[in-house]
Image (cartoon, rainbow, N blue to C red):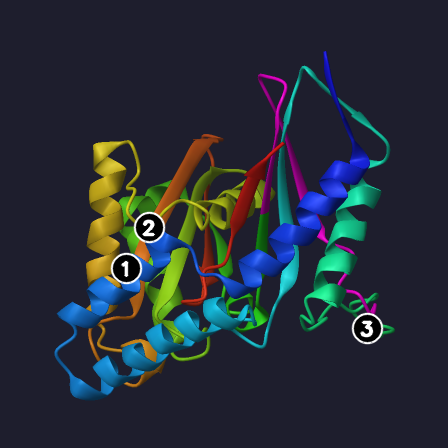
Amino acid sequence: MREIRSEEIRDCVRRLCVEACCVLPRDVRDCLEKSWGEESWPPAREILDRIIENYHIAEESMCPICQDTGVACVFLEIGQDLHIEGDIEKAVNEGVAAGYTEGCLRKSVVVDPVLNRKNSGDNTPAMIYYELVPGDRLKVTVAPKGFGSENMSRIKMLKPADGIEGVKDFIVRTAEEAGPNPCPPVVVGVGIGGTFDKAALMAKKALLRPLDERNPDPAYAALEEELRERINALGMGPQGLGGRTYALAVNIDTFATHIAGLPVAVNINCHVARHRTEVL
């Protein structure tokens, strides 16, 4: 059995927090640049110009792409043949605290959601998601999530009778009601099936899928493209000021569900679709 020390995880998370906040993934850049070429309305094209210029400046100077450096969402895929020496949750939170402090990233986490909204001072605790997988490796993904987009996310427990049209209408309506608030263009993560909480987690994980990869099921791949086109046809455009570029992609993940249910969750991400992965 392979073994790693929790300190390695701490250092990895520290690096990924800074890199994720300062360097936009290649697939997101390519999608934004492709959208610029397809955008015909001058004001929308100028907005995309500024967005593209901004992420180039951020990477060159290693400063945050956006001032909202978000809540640190940390996804851990842990090999079942791997032993971790030490406290993994403590290591992740120490890594987040160090990354956000050393990287001069804005700290946005409050310790209590209602009664005492005092800032934790180091952006902890992180939102940590664990998954046990075959092998002896640890895959660490840090995805800082700003709340301009998170606040526009929705979940609905549809009835099976609502069917595919009910699913489509809910997803498109969620994007339409979001309007300019999530700082479009956006990535739309969708989870269909499972339970209330499973659908929400699938929607968030769907945001991690590269924007140039469609669902492996051809029917859902076609649905992703149909929904992207329908959302863009609303004409809200970049920053909600008009144009054809509102949704860069719609990524759908699905899971089995109960005969009486049809859960659908929509997790929206702004154009700063940040995530960084390292395998230990």
Q: CA distance from mark 2 to mark 3?
A: 34 Å
Residue corresponding to mark 3:
119
Q: Amino acid at mark 1?
A: Cys
Residue pushed farthest top? 1
The answer to whether residue 235 is left or right of residue 163 is left
Residue 242 appears in the picture as rendered: no
Mark 1, residues whose alpha carbon is within 10 Å: few (<14), some, or many (≥20)? some
Picture coordinates of residue 50 (x, y %)?
Answer: 34, 81
**Is residue 246 highlighted in magenta?**
no
In the image, the segment drawn in magenta is 120-141
User: Which SS class for mark 3?
Assistant: loop
Q: Quadrant of residue 249?
A: bottom left
The answer to whether residue 181 is left or right of residue 39 is right
Q: CA distance from mark 1 to mark 2?
A: 7 Å
Which is more toward the observer, 266 or 160? Answer: 266
Q: Quadrant of residue 62?
A: bottom right
Query: Residue at image x 34%, y 48%?
Result: 162
User: Which SS class for mark 2?
Assistant: loop
Q: Please give the label number shown on residue 31.
A: 1
Q: Where the N terminus falls, by quadrant?
A: top right
Query: Residue at image x 29%, y 77%?
Result: 48
User: Which SS class for mark 1?
Assistant: helix
Q: Please give the label number shown on residue 211.
A: 2
Picture coordinates of residue 21 (x, y %)?
Answer: 56, 63
* Residue 33, above or below 209: below
Mark 2, residues whose alpha carbon is within 10 Å: few (<14), some, or many (≥20)? many
